[in-house]
Amino acid sequence: MKIKFAAILSIEAVLEAAKNDPDALQYCPEESKTEAVCLEAAKNDPYALQYCPEESKTEAVCLEAAKKNPDALQYCPEESKTEAVCLEAAKNAPYALRYCPEESKTEAVCLEAAKNSPYALRYCPEESKTEAVCLEAAKNDPDALRYCPEESKTEAVCLEAAKNDPYALQYCLVKELFIKIAGMLNIEVEV
């Protein structure tokens, strides 16, 4: 005869486990993994969210995870990945935007990403890649213009990019604009 051991743990014991060894959550009963327990786990090791039930992964829990290690957003449900959570991710590790839903990737979120890692623009929706966002990207890494839509590549954006790296003009495909900026920067071009 086999007897299955069923541990009885108090919420306090599970909370203590979340503080000391968040990975221990995988061995705790599901009903003991409350929002408070998962919040504590997110503070100590955001990857422990993979052991939390979906209903305990609230916006507050996911925001804490985004502060500590934005990559842990992969374990958060879509409805908890709000604009505030994604903005925090953009501040700390812009590449984590790949885990955010499209509706949370607003202009403000993408602007923050452009400040920290212009290549994160590849995870932003076209409508959030405004002139302001692309200008910020051009200041930090002109090559990131490849991720900007044509309508956001204004004279100011292309000029900023070309000042930092003349080769960035290759992403400014409006011929008149290309020639104008090249002339402003005394760059020879063949037409």
Image: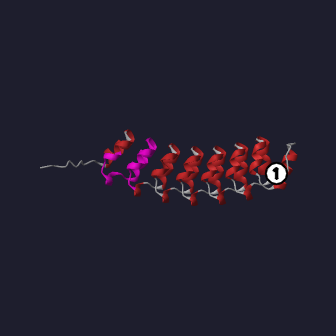
How would you rate the neighbour count of disc 1 (Cα within 10 Å): few for under 14, some for 14-19, many for 20 or more? Answer: some
Left or right? Give the position of 133 relative to 101. right
Q: Residue at x 38, y 54 (%)?
A: 53
Rendered image quadrant of residue 107: bottom right
Q: Residue at x 76, y 50 (%)?
A: 157
Residue 44 magenta: yes
Q: Nearer the viewer, residue 61 or 132?
A: 132
Q: Nearer the viewer, residue 179 or 5?
A: 179
Q: Residue at x 27, y 47 (%)?
A: 9
Residue 163 drawn at (x, y percent): 79, 42
Left or right? Give the position of 71 relative to 123. left
- Tell me how the rendering is colored: secondary structure
Residue 69 drawn at (x, y percent): 50, 43
First to last magenta residue range = 25-53
Compared to 57, does 116 lie above or below? above
Q: What residue is pinned by disc 1?
A: 178
By secondary structure, the bulk of the magenta-drawn segment is best described as helix
Residue 57 magenta: no
Q: Nearer the viewer, residue 82 or 153?
A: 153
Left or right? Give the position of 69 relative to 184. left
Residue 184 drawn at (x, y percent): 87, 46
**Tag 1's secondary structure?**
helix
In the picture as drawn, the residue positioned furthest to the top comes out as 20
Going by the numbered disc 1, the residue's amino acid type is Phe
Residue 123 drawn at (x, y percent): 60, 53
